[in-house]
Amino acid sequence: MHTELIIIGAGTAGLRTALTAAANGKETLLIGTGPLGGTCLNNGCIPTKTMLHAADVLRTVKNAKEAGVTASGKPNFAAIMKRVRAISQEGRDHAEQAIKKSPHLTYVNGEARFIAKTVVEVNNTQYSADNIIIATGTSGFVPPVPGLDQVPFLTNVETVKLTKQPKHLLILGGGYIACEYATFFATLGTKVTIVERAPTILGMLDDDVRKVVHDSLVSMGVRIFTGVATTNVSYSKQYTLTLSGADVSRVSGDALLVATGRAPNTKSLNLEAAGIAINGRGYITVDSQLRTSNKSVYAIGDVNGQSLFAHSAKREGWLALEHLLFGKRVKLDYDKIPWAVFTHPVVGGVGLSEGQAQKLGVPYEVFSASYASCGKAQIINKTEGLVKVLVNNGVVIGATVAGAQGDNLVHEFVALMHAGARGEAILREMVHAHPTLAEVFSNLKLSKG
């Protein structure tokens, strides 16, 4: 069977791109494994942020007395997780209906394998196309820790399926996924222990920003081991991690979550048959138009390793289609893509961190402000946090907002970075409404440079 376009992967990037291509009259075959929506909808962005919303609500109730309000409440873990799964199911239903309503889109559930440059095999059936887009995403990386392959541990996939709240959750890994889960479970009363091999948790953050999150996790009762190797994992009624480099030799709990990074889903694709190259980390290499070494095949989303965010993936899909359908050569500026870590407090960022600027040798000045300086932060009793802005010759080259609504507020700096040369001047000229959290930006002062 021949069609105009094949898209492999029905997650955030693949699904949206397939629907858009079909809406533009392109006869499109979408191939996916597992539930529609991929990681983001089923065991990533959507369910985890639903979980964290419940934690935010509980935190508000617990702190109601500080606002002069009498309130009481306790978490119903089963009810929280039921809502989490219901929201994901609603998204899957919506995706399924959208596919059915598209006259130019066909969906096949199965694992695709290249057998030629533009030919794939799925369920023993061959499909060819003028062009192919790979959007297979990533999966959780499982480290080679002795004993880990012998125990039934949790990943992000299993965690969103839990119906019973763990009493003591052990987390291998200290990145943003680990810290978000730690925030959720600790807020609900689970004892949480993080074991991280690197010198710090959240290694992509500057020390002053990281400290905000670290101190918050500790205040929730989270125990954090960094610079520690896990030399063995065992299970007998409880999970036990044997540690090297910590002040204790073992930690035990009734649940174990492995959150030690992501790896690209490429092994089953047989990329060699299509002449598609990968880099040293296993990600598919692409040019500025998202084309692989096989110019008839594109790779978008996490699988190309450019920017592992759902919002980046969706934009990459559109840019690949603009090139494929209309011949437009639009390059995505990855330096201006925002990101967020949904801990408490949340952290939003864009562009360079101070550590990255130092590593690259980029000259910079730092403008910073504390949330405690903001009237609205005082009103809502969320004074923990800071804003940090990097400026180079009047141009904003990076910003981090660690504090309440940092995930939303950071977009002001995304806009400033797109404004270019006048970025710092615009920042100084802007008047922010009072009292709002955005008013903290009015308090930015030169702190380094």
Image: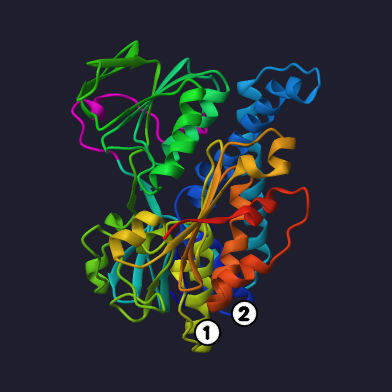
Q: Residues within 10 Å of mark 2 (few under 14, many from 20)?
A: few
Horizontally, is 405 left or right of 249 in the view?
Answer: right
Residue 256: give x, y in percent of width and height.
Answer: 37, 24
Is there any visible trace of residue 8 in the rendered image?
yes
Q: Earlier in the sequence, mark 1 or mark 2?
A: 2
Residue 280: give x, y in percent of width and height.
Answer: 21, 61
Q: Is residue 146 magenta?
A: yes
Hey, what amino acid is under mark 2? Asn
Which structural element holds mark 2? Answer: loop
The part of the image, by quadrant, that contains residue 232 is top left
Horizontally, is 430 left or right of 391 in the view?
Answer: right
Q: Nearer the viewer, residue 282 or 212?
A: 212
Which structural element holds mark 1? Answer: helix
Q: Which residue is mark 1?
A: 325
Q: Residue at x 48, y 82 (%)?
A: 330
Examine the rendered structure and indicate whether residue 94 appears above or below residue 215: below
Horizontally, is 332 left or right of 260 in the view?
Answer: right
Q: Residue at x 69, y 48 (%)?
A: 437
Examine the rendered structure and indicate whether residue 409 appears above or below residue 325: above
Hey, what amino acid is under mark 1? Leu
Disc 1 + disc 2, Cβ < 8 Å? yes
Q: Residue at x 35, y 58 (%)?
A: 356
What is the magenta range? Answer: 142-161
Q: Residues within 10 Å of mark 1 (few under 14, many from 20)?
A: few
Q: Nearer the viewer, residue 86 or 213?
A: 213
Residue 294: give x, y in percent of width and height.
Answer: 30, 78
* Quadrant in the picture for the N terminus: bottom left
Alpha carbon distance from label 1 to label 2: 9 Å
Q: Is residue 68 magenta?
A: no
Q: Nearer the viewer, residue 305 or 79?
A: 305
Res. 212 mark:
none
Q: Which residue is mark 2?
A: 24
